[in-house]
Amino acid sequence: MLLDPWIDPWEIEDPKDLEKRDRATKIIDVMARALVSDERKTFLMGGIGSSVMAGHDNCHMDSYESQMERLWKPVWNAAGMDFVFQNAGEGGGCGDSHENQVFCVKQNISPDVDIVHYEWTYFEHGAAAPQHESLIRWTQMLPRQPPVHIYNTGEMKGIPEEDLAKQYAKYGFNAFYMKTGFYNGGHDYNSEKIREKDPFDRFSPGHVGDGYHDTTRYGELEADPKRQESLGVVMRNWHPGPMGFQLTSDAFTYVYTKALLEALRLIEMYFDDGEDPREIWSENSRPMLLKEDLPEPLHCDPEYCVVDEAPGCLNYEAPTYGFWGARVEDPNDDLNPHKGEVQNWSVWQQSNSLLYMVGKQDIAVFSEREDIEMCRHLDACGGISGITKNDGMVVFRLPKMEVGLVVICGCCGKKVAEEFFVNNPSIEIRYNTVVLDPKTFDIWPNGKCVRLLKRFPTQGRESETPTGHAYLSLKVIEDMKNPVRISHVITI
């Protein structure tokens, strides 16, 4: 039920198939390195995704990441470590999708994660192989080379992205399908939908009970019957409910625990043979991967996905846990090429209420409870804004780049890039002090973002970096009715 609803079902102990063995070896290696390290205090996972990842229409503590933290933390505590799952899921209100957020894996979650989760079920429409492959390749350039595991809420039809599963088995890639997991348990969901008397669909919005349980495990301990019922919901709407998230948490935890047990068996075996497992699985012994070590890409653009560093990203939205790429330069810094000019753009972040994106059922339950804070979601739109000439400009010092790709995204909306950056005579955009022609921009990788440069300029002042840094600036040259707000600066 839990090992099989994946693109390639897991076999952790002694798999005979080479592909399965490679995938199992990778996830066992992840566990072993965390266990034997003298310096490691936390096993760290991170998830990037949409409102499903964020847990919307539920209390935040009912998201699968929060359930997984509560379920698996005692195991790591027994090893003298902590377990943390960084939930960087964001709703669609800021205009983001997998197309731009995948570039921000190194900022949205920590670059030191052990495993990366990805979810954009309702945005992809079956056409996200380039983003999936890019993410797989970029994560292998991070310090701990985390495997990527995709979370899909639906049912697996055929074997989607089988080519990626084969191509990147040794890097641990796999994808889980929640609804398939329910079906694999043996309950006959289809007959319930077509029976003559009182037919029903357990995956319809608000249905309580998954055919195996009437509420979650922690729901069984809940004194409030309304809350207990709410915790039994499989699907709130297109968002899973706590019961759907419980299966998801259990599936991931089960696979990882089997890998953890196998890692412990191997560690014990080395001790029995008089060998120190730290010599095998220390951080220093981890092989360094370079871009040419990975196989040829199948779907992603090699100019951007065959690189030695994951993209840089400055993301003003919340939450983020990692390291920014670009940064706003100090107006008085001697290296700032626009020193002496007005630089007054201001940072803005949306202020959401405590019960933002919590479903009505839980709002009714928690409105009078003291533990209401556990419902608060973490995601919020944000950006750095300019609206009048008195705001002047914002100057970004760009990080070291390998290709020269420069992208900026606007907030908030799915198609703001053209209005903000392409057809806006009130804004002037410069790269290394040279004014860029908006006619050279293209809307990319989605409607909220614009690609300013596809690669490094090869001639002119814009190709020169006498200080060792490249600079991007946006200037308000005439007052506007509405602010221009930058949510992301993306570079490779």
Image (tube, rainbow, N blue to C red):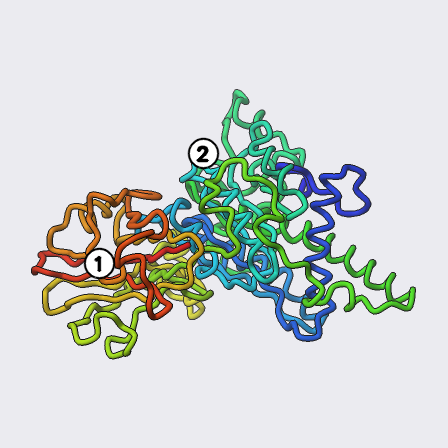
Q: Is residue 209 above or below residue 467?
A: above
Residue for point 34% across, 67% down = 327
Q: Residue furthest front?
A: 459
Quadrant in which the C terminus appears: bottom left
Q: How many neighbours does mark 1 have within 10 angstroms: few (below 14), some (14-19), or many (20 or more)?
A: some
Residue 37 vs residue 368: left or right? right
Residue 320 seen anywhere in this rendered image of the structure = yes
Pinpoint residue 177: horizontal percent, then vertical percent. 57, 39
Residue linked to disc 1:
434
Which residue is depicted at the point 38% across and 59% down? 379
Q: Where is 358 relative to 182, above or below?
A: below
Query: Element type at marker 1?
Result: strand
Task: Please name whichever residue, 364 or 452, is drawn nearer the observer in this view of the structure.
Answer: 452
Residue 58 appears in the rendering: no
Q: Amino acid at mark 2?
A: Ala
- Determine which quarter of the picture holds residue 156: top right
Vertical comparison of 318 with 195: above or below: below
Quadrant location of the N terminus in the rendered image: top right
Q: Which residue is mark 2?
A: 127
